Amino acid sequence: MTSVDLTIVQPDIERYLKDITPDRDSVLTEMEAYAQQTGFPIVGPLVGRLLFLLAASTHAKRILELGSGFGYSAYWFARATGEDARIICTDMEQKNAQRAQEWFARGDIEKKIVFHVGDALAVLAAAEGEFDIIFNDIDKHRYPKALALSIPKLRRGGLFISDNVLWKGRVLNDRPDEATAAILTFNRQLYSMPELFSAIIPLRDGVSVSIKL
């Protein structure tokens, strides 16, 4: 075996989970339709509900997203948090930030969100104070660096969450490409760092959740 590209969740099971998932509000539904039409990758409603649950259960007030796209995951975080919460979004594309701001305004959550256009890791490095949640969804070859920079910025008891950690099953490849090799390194680090307790959830494309001890 030299190359693997697998569906992580059995399609019938994923279809079942989507079928029993309640309808979202009109803004989230529109964002999902836009992603479907344009082929833009988003975490989708199954992971979105997980993000909501994690933010609400930890009473998160300060969240940093490393890679926000047009704001789909940030919208879930904003819905889960109180009026005093702040979500810092990052993306390299101005057009994504503009589109996100339009949806945030329509969802009446724009006051919670600050959107930085530029390099996510530069924003992280310059950020002051600690975060309750850092959500990592940047280019996969940068995952190990994101981990190294994030943990000092995370409060004790805070969560470090990453998407795509099973990478369509490519973590099983005998000859991984650069992105896959980086994810393999990243996953090993998650489980070996003494300051973290981590689990990988095989939902959609794999979501890791780590708590800082």
Image (cartoon, helix red, strand yellow):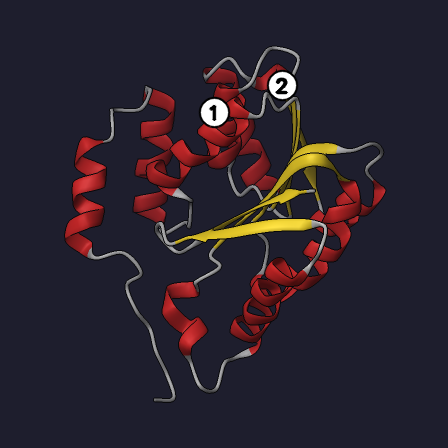
Instruction: Check disc 1 and give the amino acid type.
Output: Trp
Instruction: Check disc 2 and give the amino acid type.
Output: Lys
Q: Tell me if I can see residue 39 in this picture.
A: yes
The crowding category of the residue bearing disc 1, from other C-alpha atoms within 10 Å (few below 14, some 14 to 19, many at least 20), is many
Which mark, by number, is residue 103?
1
Residue lying at 51% horizontally and 24% vertically, measured from the top left: 57
The answer to whether residue 40 is left or right of residue 199 is: left
Residue lying at 19% horizontally and 55% vertically, measured from the top left: 11
Q: Position of residue 184 (x, y in %)?
A: 55, 70
Tell me the quarter of the picture where residue 126 sits: top right
Residue lying at 74% horizontally and 48% vertically, measured from the top left: 151
Report the Cα–Cα distance between label 1 and label 2: 13 Å
Relative to 177, residue 12 above or below: above
Q: Which quadrant does the C terminus fall into?
A: top right
Q: Label 2, on which residue?
A: 112
The answer to whether residue 133 is left or right of residue 70 is: right
The answer to which of 41 and 130 lies nearer the viewer is: 130
- Dots 1 and 2: beta carbons under 8 Å? no
Q: Secondary structure at mark 1?
A: helix
Q: Tell me if I can see residue 119 in this picture.
A: no
Q: Position of residue 104 (x, y in %)?
A: 52, 22
Q: Position of residue 8 (x, y in %)?
A: 31, 60
Q: Position of residue 30 (x, y in %)?
A: 33, 29
Q: Which quadrant does the N terminus fall into?
A: bottom left
Q: Secondary structure at mark 2?
A: helix
Which mark, by number, is residue 122?
none
Residue lying at 19% horizontally and 32% vertically, measured from the top left: 20
The crowding category of the residue bearing disc 2, from other C-alpha atoms within 10 Å (few below 14, some 14 to 19, many at least 20), is many
Q: How many marks on residues?
A: 2
Relative to 127, residue 191 above or below: below
